[in-house]
Amino acid sequence: AQRVTQPEKLLSVFKGAPVELKCNYSYSGSPELFWYVQYSRQRLQLLLRHISRESIKGFTADLNKGETSFHLKKPFAQEEDSAMYYCALRGTQKLVFGQGTRLTINP
Amino acid sequence: EPEVTQTPSHQVTQMGQEVILRCVPISNHLYFYWYRQILGQKVEFLVSFYNNEISEKSEIFDDQFSVERPDGSNFTLKIRSTKLEDSAMYFCASSESPWDEQFFGPGTRLTVL
């Protein structure tokens, strides 16, 4: 079975503080992992994919196959990072999403 | 920058009625998808479509659902006889290949009364 778990529905941090959004997955093969972001009144958009191994808007995510995790991190949060963040897995063509974490950055 | 578009943004219908949700994928994309998100729940995959055929579908995508590419630009999702539990946000997505990024539309909010 393909499953993505984001344990935190809500996460609130202060501006300038580090951020970590947790994501764990379950998949029998070798999945591709993604982070999608949805800013207020905007569409879902891709933030990161594990195969590209790049940093977008200061965010990074490392795939840990041993812990089946793909946590999203940013060392210094900014107010514009406030959004809904979804972790997703792709094994076949479809994306399997987690519940999402609403991140709020307090000034 | 090209975007996936969806119409209408909000559709209200009576239980038992048929609805058609429309999507215009990005023009050079060949793979199309529908997802839905019931309020407070996860975004769930419904169906993927390529070369005028369904390539993958979920358990949710039963006989009351169908998809079609009626012309060179539109991609539609039809729900034949809507139920209360079909109320959700429906997202269309498209990609160049099955392994490329899926680009999402803004969604259609379907409300079944």
Image (cartoon, rainbow, N blue to C red):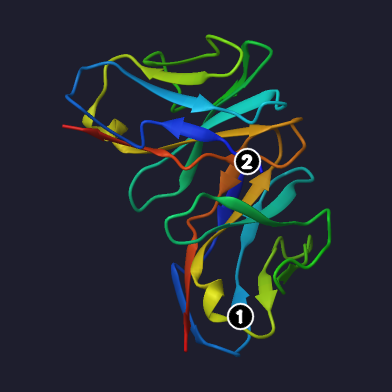
Subunit under mark 2: B
State the image coordinates of residue B10 (x, y, percent, origin top left): 30, 36
Q: Nearer the viewer, mark 1 or mark 2?
A: 2
* Marks 1 & 2 on one chain: no
SS class of the residue under badge 2?
strand
State the image coordinates of residue B55 (x, y, percent, origin top left): 65, 19
User: Which residue type carries mark 2?
Assistant: Phe
Any part of residue A1 in sight: no
Number of numbered labels in the structure image: 2
Q: Is residue A92 left or right of residue B63?
A: right
Q: Is residue B8 left or right of residue B101?
A: left
Image quadrant for the N terminus of chain A? top right
Contact (Cβ within 8 Å) of mark 1 with mark 2 = no
Residue positioned 77% across, 43% down in the render: A29
SS class of the residue under badge 1?
strand
Residue positioned 70% across, 70% down in the render: A57
Q: Is residue B55 above or below residue B10?
A: above
Task: Give me the disc on residue A19.
Answer: 1
Comparing A95 with A83, the one in front is: A83
Q: Which residue is mark 2?
A: B103
Q: Is residue B40 above or below residue B55?
A: below
State the image coordinates of residue A32 (x, y, percent, origin top left): 75, 48
Comparing A66 with A78, the one in front is: A78
User: Which residue type carries mark 1?
Assistant: Val
Residue positioned 62% across, 51% down in the render: A88
Q: CA distance from mark 1 to mark 2?
A: 26 Å
Any part of residue B93 in sight: yes
Comparing A82 with B28, the one in front is: B28
Q: Is residue B22 left or right of residue B15?
A: right
Task: Give me the disc on residue A35.
Answer: none
